[in-house]
Amino acid sequence: MENSKKQLLRHLPKIDEVMNLLEQKGIFSKAPRDIVRTACRTVVDNQRQEIMRREGAGKEMPEPLIDRVAEKVMQVIEDLYTFRLRKVVNATGVILHTNLGRSPLSDDALRRLIDVAGGYSNLEFDLAKGGRGFRYDHVRRILCVLSGAEDALVVNNNAAAVLLVVNTFAEGREVVVSRGELVEIGGEFRIPEVMEKSGAHLREIGTTNRTRLSDYEKVIGSETGLILKVHTSNFKIVGFTEEADLSALVSLGKRYGVPVMNDLGSGCFTELDRYGLEREPTVRDVLKTGVDVITFSGDKLLGGPQAGIILGREDTLLKVKKNPLNRALRIDKLTLAALEATLIQHLQPEKAVIGLRTLKTLTEPLSTVTKRAKKLLSALQKERFEGLSIALKKGTSMAGGGSLPTQEIDTALLSVVSARMSPSALEERLRSLDVPIIARISDDEVLFDLRTIVEEEFIYIREGLKKISSSQGRSL
């Protein structure tokens, strides 16, 4: 066996030999010499490791001929031209799917991106004064109008917003938080760890299910820098529970001269209960309590790009803006352009729930979703896909993204069952399409949730199933 390995290793081609062959194949029209050489080394090293890992005399390993190695290098270079960030069809029914990019941008926001990104802009230039301006001013006024806040600041995401505010008011000091609000959200983002990075000291109070106003008052002292209330956006505690009212915390903070912050997670400008959903306090509702500062995401219930929005009292925001950390967390011109377009749509709430896809998807009547599902079902049935059976079912969607955690939203599903492959194999094939379709599996069926699928995406589903049906597939 060792002799066989040695023989294969001796047949590994030299890097220069592979380079010469690749030059004849025109490889340098696609990549410079140093990149090609690195790819050659990687492929040859992989071949060497594969030979060394070989055990037993079962499967014969082909000799690493120079043509085979050159072909692998060509594949490596070609793969560099393949976009990794790709469009997918969200058929999961999770509306704010963090792994799939949360909120799709509106047509207005996309147009603004093209207008601003395609040339120069007045990002930090005051057109009226002819001198340096502030990037935050492009959205500050409209945020204040929509929310009733005295001042506004935007950073690159809500985690950054929390970090910045806590660092501003409590670096080296204590932040008072209820144990029931020490949440962890997606990507293992934990409130206690953010506090640690901010330089603040966590002061836990109360219990998991019950925290009273008196628990806060007992621990306030000279070391208290901030009172923090956190929206438990991705779970609910029910039963024997109690929490301090935000208005009461604001009064407590004023009495002791301690600022009060509320991390909303998913800030909302829309009264969702008008559309049969759970009541979620709006940003304006929260600010009416007199809270010093609030933070929330731009790409959740707001329906815009990823951003961390900070609103509150003018004197409070002034301190936050002066924090040197602010520059490291600032947003770019693309985020500003998309956010401004999104906020303008919120000026007309009845139009926002139509123009912003996230809000439209959340509030769309079941009858409309079902009608769309029947239209897709009819189109797919006309194709007569061999080995696939498709049927209409009832089901529920969810908001996702840490928003409305207990809300189940009625929806219409298409169930897809293959006679030739398992549900997991079919789901994998759907993910491998040119435009991947991300579905869910339940009760041995692959399910397409029409609440998160728009009619313009029907073609990807139809062509994808056609491709899967026409191939034999691999039965698992």
Image (cartoon, rainbow, N blue to C red):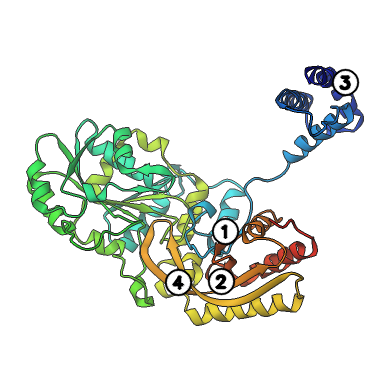
* SS at badge 3: helix
The residue beneath circle 2 is: 450
From the image, state whether disc 1 or disc 4 is nearer to you: 4
Instruction: Indicate the amino acid at tag 3.
Output: Glu
Q: Amino acid at mark 1?
A: Leu
- CA gap, disc 3 to disc 1? 49 Å
Locate residue 160, reporting x and y percent. 38, 42
Whether the residues at callouts 1 and 2 have beta carbons within 8 Å, the answer is no
What residue is drawn where x is 12% and y is 47%? 216
- The local crowd at label 4, few if under 14, some if 14 to 19, many if 20 or more residues have their Cα within 10 Å, is many
Residue 126: horizontal and vertical position, in percent? 44, 46
Q: Nearer the viewer, residue 206 or 453?
A: 206
Answer with mark 2 or mark 4, whichever residue precedes in sequence.
4
Q: Earlier in the sequence, mark 3 or mark 2?
A: 3
**Residue that label 3 marks:** 17
Foreground tag (3 vs 1):
3
The structure residue drawn at horizontal position 79% and vertical position 60%, both measured from the top left corner, is 472
Which residue matches tag 1? 110
Q: Is residue 183 above or below residue 241?
A: above
Kind of residue indicated by mark 2: Leu
Depicted 33 relative to depicted 340: above or below: above
